[in-house]
Image: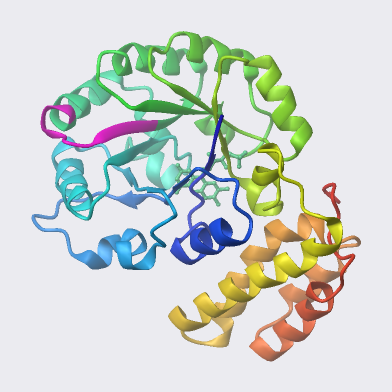
Amino acid sequence: MNLYLAPVQGMTIAGYRNAFARIFGGIDEFYSPFVATADHKKISTSLLKDILPEHNAAQVKVIPQLLGNNGDDFSIFSSAIYEMGYKEINWNIGCPFPMVTNKKKGSGILPYPDMIENFLDIVCARKPYTLTVKMRLGLESSEEGLRVMEILNRYPLGGVIIHARTGIQMYTGSVDPDSFEALASACRHQITYNGDIFTYDDYIRVSKRFPYIKNFMLGRGALSDPFLPALIKGKTVPPAHKMSMIKEFHDEIYMYYQNILSGDKHLCDKMKEFWSYISVHTDRDGKLMKKIKKCHTSANYLQAVNQILCSPDGWSGTPLR
Ligand SMILES: Cc1cc2nc3c(=O)[nH]c(=O)nc-3n(C[C@H](O)[C@H](O)[C@H](O)COP(=O)(O)O)c2cc1C
């Protein structure tokens, strides 16, 4: 069984992935947040800085992800990525944000199988790397995904990751296991399940429902509970050690952002995002998040979070909300 960390824009960047792998483990491959392709004749390294090998620990397996609907642009970006040493690249056809979908990108391309065919004709004719796809059930309905799967089946892909929601659901509502099953059975490629694995019991439920699925991608569940992937792999951490590991993780990410962001405000805003996930297991009464939201200086921020980070019983094994 393989576990993958889902790409989460603004969160699962190089510093986060490196710290996660070293401190918590349990993840076999880390998908990078998407880079949007565009009409560039030459790709400057600043566009790809998150995946530059010098920013990524050698033992962390990263799968770069690209978003776009133009096969020529994609090929230029993917050549540059291949030249950095990556052998696998993921195509995002799942992003649900209207700014993306309105341009027929992300899940916005799912109602247009002809565009997908045209894209894959161009990309697959040239690619020396393995191409994988991350998709949703459809933009508005799972019938769209089934039509797309007929096209995907015709190309030499390394696998398909399915987030079991439609694009218009965004991140709300529930996943749709029946539609996932229909799409997975129609797919001749290796499938990865993605969506709403927040606890060990969620993982057990999904793996029992789909015993033929061997790959699982975790996003918000792993960001909220970084012990979850290792737990799924059978490794438990004594509860008394958990908060010190969270502190180590927090401090590494804080330092990482301190080095790359200018000004306390940006740093505090970034760390608020970090806590929006971690607080699910640490903030019993909502007071911590309220305090963090009010912080605009690093001194205030550190004062607010150190109390919880230094409390040995600050971690709740089950989600608090
Ligand atoms: C804030 C945010 C940013 C995301 N960014 C990306 C992204 O860059 N690329 C991508 O394929 N999916 C992205 N996703 C979707 C996740 O990778 C994942 O498919 C989704 O959260 C469902 O999995 P989960 O229920 O385990 O979180 C993002 C999700 C969130 C909440």
x and y percent of residue 152 in the render?
Answer: 31, 18
Q: Is residue 311 left or right of residue 92?
A: right
Q: Identify the magenta region.
A: 124-133
In the image, residue 285 above or below residue 199: below
- Magenta-colored stretch includes residue 116: no
Q: How is the image coloured?
A: rainbow
Q: Is residue 61 left or right of residue 41?
A: right
The N terminus lies in which quarter of the figure?
top right
Front-most of residues 217 and 118: 217
Kindly identify the residue that appears in the image at 78 percent across and 61 percent down.
242
Q: Residue 24 lies in what quarter of the image?
A: bottom right
Kindly identify the residue that appears in the image at 18 percent across and 64 percent down.
44
Front-most of residues 204 and 195: 204
Front-most of residues 127 and 220: 127
Front-most of residues 293 and 103: 293
Tag count in the figure? 0
x and y percent of residue 143 in the render?
Answer: 47, 12
- Magenta-colored stretch includes residue 131: yes
x and y percent of residue 291 in the render?
Answer: 80, 76
In the image, residue 276 above or below residue 104: below
For residue 297, say whether it is visible: no
In the image, residue 146 above or below residue 287: above
Q: Is residue 174 left or right of residue 128?
A: right
Q: Residue 238 lies in what quarter of the image?
A: bottom right
Q: Residue 200 lies in what quarter of the image?
A: top right
For residue 66, say whether it is visible: yes
Kindly identify the residue that appears in the image at 15 percent across and 51 percent down.
39
Q: Is residue 287 left or right of residue 109?
A: right
